[in-house]
Amino acid sequence: MQSDLPSLLDLQHAFANALRNAGDGRASSSVTAGALAPQDRVGIYRNTSTATLVAALRLSYPAVQALVGPEFFEGAARLFIEAEPPRSAWLDAYGEGYPVFLARLPEAAAIPYVPDVARLDWAVNSVLHAPDAMPLDLGRLAELDMAVAGEICFVAHPAVRLVQADSPVDVIWRAVLMRDDRALGLVDLASGPVSLLVRRASAGIDVDRIHAWQWQFAGALLAGAPLHIALGAASPADAHAWLATLLCAGCFTGFGRAPCA
């Protein structure tokens, strides 16, 4: 005889839908009656879930919250949670789409550089929570056959990110986090765009401003492009010095002959 009771998977799906949609009553029908009505009990889970996700976004976007204030941040975060619920239980990885969401949010238009600050916040958060990995042993490069050096491609370290922004977002980001109103007031918004290298170092997270060509070169290498493609037909004279800087900074974990996975 077939049971009318929902399966565990059906119940989990119903609760997930109820957390996103207060009008979905399917989960309430499976809750045992008690002191509170079933829909009220599900509402407690919904409120707890939303509060947890807002807290996760606060941790990932500290500069954005300091810039717009806690009330505005929470309101925008709740709208984002409705539009993009999490797809995994790893909260440190939740919120990647928040900068794009803020760029489309009419209420955020009064501070045009908020999306740029959010993208830098996310890059720092990603680097902070990236897995550990041993940097490339530079001694291995001495064994290379220089005849095939141009075909070499590198494996990116997981704790390295690149950011480009129209505004001087690094200066804004530091001033906001330091709560330095004077420094923030001196920011020249016309001094952008900027290109940034964000990486995890022994002393913390480094956010370094670099030249546009350095950003492009590093981006190609981090994406696995062969060295001769990354250098291009007219590479700057100091491109090899920049490659040495990236290697010494531990931006790669390995290398191989193209194509690299």
Image (tube, rainbow, N blue to C red):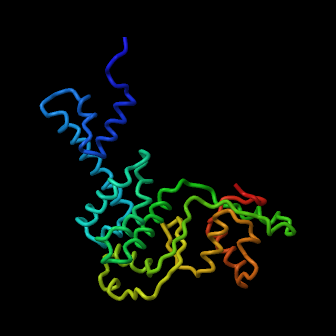
Give the left or right position of residue 233, taking residue 134 as reference. Answer: right
Query: Which of the two residues, 32 or 260, is positioned nearer the viewer here?
Result: 32
At a point 30% along the width and 77% down the height, the residue shown is 110
Give the left or right position of residue 222, taking residue 90 as reference. Answer: right
Coordinates of residue 136 in the picture (x, y in percent): 68, 61
Q: Residue furthest left?
A: 35
In this rendering, the answer to whether 14 lies above or below 258 is: above
In this rendering, the answer to whether 208 lies above or below 182 is: above
Coordinates of residue 100 in the picture (x, y in percent): 42, 65
At a point 66% along the width and 59% down the height, the residue shown is 253
Count of numbered badges drawn on the protein: 0
On the rendered image, what quadrant is the C terminus found in?
bottom right
In this rendering, the answer to whether 158 lies above or below 177 is: above
**Corner quadrant of residue 104:** bottom left
Q: Residue furthest top?
A: 1
At a point 68% along the width and 62% down the height, the residue shown is 224
In this rendering, the answer to whether 141 lies above or below 30 is: below
Query: Which of the two residues, 131 or 86, is positioned nearer the viewer here?
Result: 86
**Corner quadrant of residue 140:** bottom right
Query: Which of the two residues, 180 or 185, is positioned nearer the viewer here?
Result: 185
Coordinates of residue 178 in the picture (x, y in percent): 34, 75
**Corner quadrant of residue 248:** bottom right
Coordinates of residue 50 in the picture (x, y in percent): 28, 50
Give the left or right position of residue 107, taking residue 93 as reference. Answer: left
On the rendered image, what quadrant is the N terminus found in?
top left
Give the left or right position of residue 93, taking residue 30 as reference. Answer: right
